[in-house]
Amino acid sequence: MVEEEGNGRRSIPRAAKKQVTYKEVTIEDKPKVKRVKKTDNKEDEEKPNKDEIDQGTCATEKRKRGDSATTSTKEGKKKQENKKQRNTLVEKDNTENGMCHQCQRNDNGPVVRCLNCKRKRYCFPCLKTWYPSVSHMKIAEKCPFCCNTCNCRACLRLDTKMEGLNSDLKVSKDEKIQCSKYILKTLLPHLKVINAEQIMEKQVEAKILGLELEDVKPQDAKCHPDERLYCDNCETAIFDLHRSCSKCCSDMCLTCCLEIRKGKLQTREDDVSWNFTNRGLEYEHGEEGEIKVTDDKLKAEDSKKRPSGWKANDTGIITCYCGDGDLKLKRILPDDMVSNLVKRVEEANKDLDLPEMVMEPCSCFNSEGHINMNNDKSLKAACRVGSEDNYLYYPHVTDVQQDDVKHFQHHWVKGEPVVVRDVLAATAGLSWEPMVMYRGCRQIKHVKHGELKEVNAIDCLDGCEYVVNLHQFFAGYTKGRYDRMGWPQLLKLKDWPPAKTFKENLPRHCEEFLCSLPLKQYTHPRSGPLNIAVKLPEDCLKPDMGPKTYVAYGFAEEFGRGDSVTKLHCDMSDAVNVLTHICEVPIVKDMKPTMKKLKKAHAEQDVKELFSSVPNYQEKMEILKNTSEAQVGEDDGALWDIFRREDVPKLEEYLVKHHKEFRHFYCCPVSQVVHPIHDQSFYLTRYHIMILKEEYGIEPWTFVQKLGEAVLIPVGCPHQVRNLKSCTKVALDFVSPENVGECFRLTKEYRLLPPNHHSKEDKLQIKKMVVYAIDKALNDLSGKESPEPQEKKRAKRVTKPIW
């Protein structure tokens, strides 16, 4: 039996409730409220009192008489004359006909009947609770169910297409052809790099076997279709040619094979040990604290050294670290598939006249090449001297829907973020209120949706996860929470709902998000013609690109410790982030003196532990100690800092130099840096951003994301976010043709990280995407269906450490 949380139901059984039938009501010009009981007395009609007229938004009408007799009173004549100008109200004999669609009850008083579908009714209490901003007049004209905005539990879990709401992207034949040409032109250089790696390895194999290059035939890897192959040394995803041990079945990518033959294997063999110590909440608020017993898996004693016994002889043969076998050349894709693709693209380049990527000035600039100050599609986000990229492309959602993508591509190809306004206007308007999402997800027991009463929330003060009741978390989202020492407790849910996909848990919200996506040619996760990630075949094990929800508390004031932040990091691919809901939670007045005292203790502790060697830092700390609450607009939600790709070397240098001035897990000082960006250990406060500009002359694009805005972040741009209010965001990853080169660069950085680093695993598999994207583009241009090769994959060390 399915047992769910009640949807507004009381604990008494339905049979024990008083059965009262009310007339259905619709809307008149001067709304009234009137409750009418069933009666046989024709004159037993009550006149609405003044309070009912002021309070209600619906009206009742007298019972229809069978013979439609003429009313003798003046009031009756007037009503009869205006009969055609009003909505007719009909009383039903069956009590079930007055049931509210939202709460499934028929004893909650008057209901508003929808004149559009003539079936759905909503009671006054439900309208006040769940649709407070919608007038009863609007409900009567077209109810939430007809508008696809009904947030009852049943509708929130509908996983079928909603009438009048379609998130799919329809691509014309001409548009598909132009996008295919663009993909071929953009990805050909990367395909040639992949082909060169394979030819080089085949040449080594030809030398080993004493054959001509064209006679080299790699063995079939014989992998299962539902598995993925990883390199045993660097854990990079293997999509085609690789070497495998004939005895222990260990696998190695071509890059590692090349480095072994050169005698310079660059990957790290030992795990990293972070040594963050839990000293308790007292230490996190400036006191000494005591070391706590913890299950932290990042201690030094848990680190281990990985085997590294691969050796190569003069002929190029690599002996496995197991010592019992040599590494044999194997393939996953059909033989010579990559080489054949290169030839086909080069032929298409001649026959199809593939377009050149011409960088013409866009409308954001005037005739002299300077930024157009009167342009309403530009957002100032930086103050770099002598730079023309201080402004970001800032179109309205209607602009990107009506225009072609060339304006967007002009900024995107240069690695600039893009902010699109009012993307929620393209949706049905389903509520993203936290309690609506809570009702859609929360259940005690359900055979389809599983059990979801508690969640693992991250405390921004110490970076650790804690089990929190789902209802309590969302209550804190709107009302705030404080720890036992009086400091605001800022929690966040990352990649929520857990376990299953966003679509499985909240199908209606997922559909709503997909409708809101701007520039769907790039961002649509199923049919975007310029989204390389969608080109993978159906039977392929695909990376998790989202969408994912991020729900977090936030305050306008920058506390300096425990702020609601996403620390500096670099995504594995391009991403779009939509702010769907915000809620301002004021700080409790009685807590302000306590917070001021704790902030002073934080500053003194920082001076002692972090900045004792920094000249005159105590003077600068006074700025942080006395910060006041920032002024934010009504629609402001999150503060973004996005760095340019060309500034990454200087940014990394600054972080390595100043890393001891930052705190991470358990508020412990950062003692070491493996990779300043991929460690995700740093959030640069306004103070650090000021020092960064003074010392290195660089600054990020800084802007506030407002409700309903979508931020598109190019891969390779480090960024950080701080929530100015409680925020609900939905994010989706995609891969654009222009940024494939950055994906290649990041993949190389990931493989050099320690084996237990959280960014180590190659989740994207960009080389596989490039091969399949080009193959599909060629078949689209020729009018053929893409023959999906029977890809074979095997899981290899797919698990990763839990941080």
Image (spheres, rainbow, N blue to C red):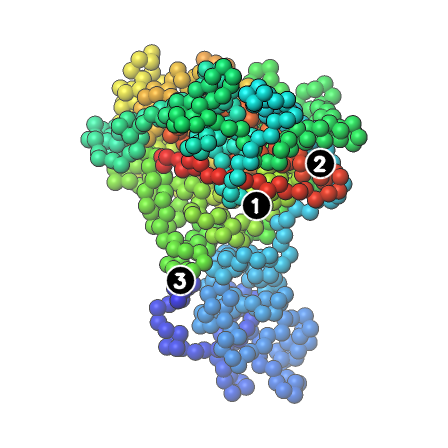
Label 2 SS:
helix
Q: Secondary structure at mark 1?
A: loop
Locate the C terminus by quadrant: top left
Of 505 and 406, which appears nearest the observer? 505
Determine which of the numbered discs, if any, sits on residue 778 in the image.
2
Residue on which disc 1 sits: 539
The residue drawn where x is 59% and y is 45% is 538
Q: Relative to the observer, which residue lies in front, 574 or 479? A: 574
Residue on which the image places disc 3: 4
Q: Amino acid at mark 1?
A: Asp
Q: CA distance from mark 3 to mark 1?
A: 35 Å
Q: Residue at x 73, y 27 (%)?
A: 346
Q: Is disc 3 placed on a helix, strand or loop?
A: loop
The label nearer to you, 3 versus 1, is: 1
Residue 739: x %, y % from top left = 60, 28
Apparent side of residue 303 relative to residue 566 in the rendered image (left or right): left
Residue 212 quadrant = top right
Label 2 to label 3, Cα distance in Å? 51 Å
Picture residue at 49% right of the left edge, 14% below the top: 314
